Amino acid sequence: MKSRTPPRRVVSLVPSLTEAVARTAPGLLVGATDWCSEPAGLDVVRIGGTKNPDTARIAALAPDLVLANEEENREPDLAALRAAGLTVLVTEVRTLPQAFTELARVLVDGCGLARPAWLDAAEAAWRELPAPAAIGVSPARTELRAWGRTAVVPIWRRPWMVLGRDTFAGDLLARLGVRNLHAEHAERYPRVPLDALRSGGADLVVLPDEPYRFSAGDGPEAFPGLPAALVSGRHLTWYGPSLVDAPAVLAEALAGAR
């Protein structure tokens, strides 16, 4: 979308986009969800969760633009905001290139901002990745490793849910040389019994700390004998300024799988 008049008041219903806007134009945001934790100390009105935003409170803030995502936010809530006369920009992010395109659409076209330097830096960081087969470990610094591994990637337990097809996080892992065992599953976030996860043929388990907070004491024990990589969920699943450091942060975590 292209705004004739750049918005002066923005509400974000997506943590990734909240961080992207706040880092680029401090003061533009007037509202964000309870889950919008970055940048630290963000001082805006909190309007509920991503799945249950307080639409009346959002409308009362009189934003010029509401930022949303087709996966994180529910259509009935977005319809209610539109019915209140608000402009809603809905993003779709399922691959890294799509993330870069949508971030530019939000920041430049939607918010009327200059393209931020961090977005160029993020594109460069991922563009300069060595091909997985050519990646090694340097004695001078931690680099990506040619895993050639197949991973199961849980995102929740009780019940166990994993990354399936067509996900942003799965695309990032593929670019780091890690194949998602369930990448061809019919569902994007399927529920899979633990026994099936253990016997599926993976030789690595990748455990992010969000949306479920997997940790050294909560997750690896469910996959005895399988190396576990504990990774930053923000760097694996967020599309925003975190993408600048994500290749190095995720590479170090994958290299430390044990």
Image: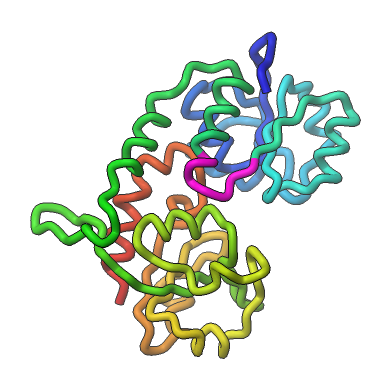
Percent position of residue 242, x then y: 42, 42
Q: Nearer the viewer, residue 209 or 171?
A: 171
Q: Is residue 94 magenta?
A: yes
- Residue occupying image coordinates x 67% and y 25%: 10
**Which image quarter is the C terminus in?**
bottom left
Percent position of residue 257, x then y: 31, 72
Taking 20 as reference, is 130 above or below it?
Answer: below
Q: Is residue 26 magenta?
A: no
113 with respect to 61 (left or right): left
Give the farthest residue toward the top. 5
Q: Nearer the viewer, residue 151 or 224?
A: 151
- Residue occupying image coordinates x 48% and y 77%: 219
Q: What are the residue bounds of the magenta stretch?
A: 92-99
Taking 39 as reference, is 191 above or below it?
Answer: below
Taking 75 as reference, is 134 above or below it?
Answer: below
- Residue occupying image coordinates x 50% and y 85%: 200
Percent position of residue 15, x then y: 58, 43
**The quarter of the displayed image where residue 48 is located:** top right
Percent position of residue 218, x then y: 48, 76
**Which image quarter is the N terminus in?**
top right
Q: How is the image coloured?
A: rainbow
Q: Nearer the viewer, residue 48 or 50?
A: 50
Q: How many marks?
A: 0
Taking 251 as reference, is 94 above or below it?
Answer: above
- Residue occupying image coordinates x 73% and y 39%: 47
146 with respect to 44 (left or right): left
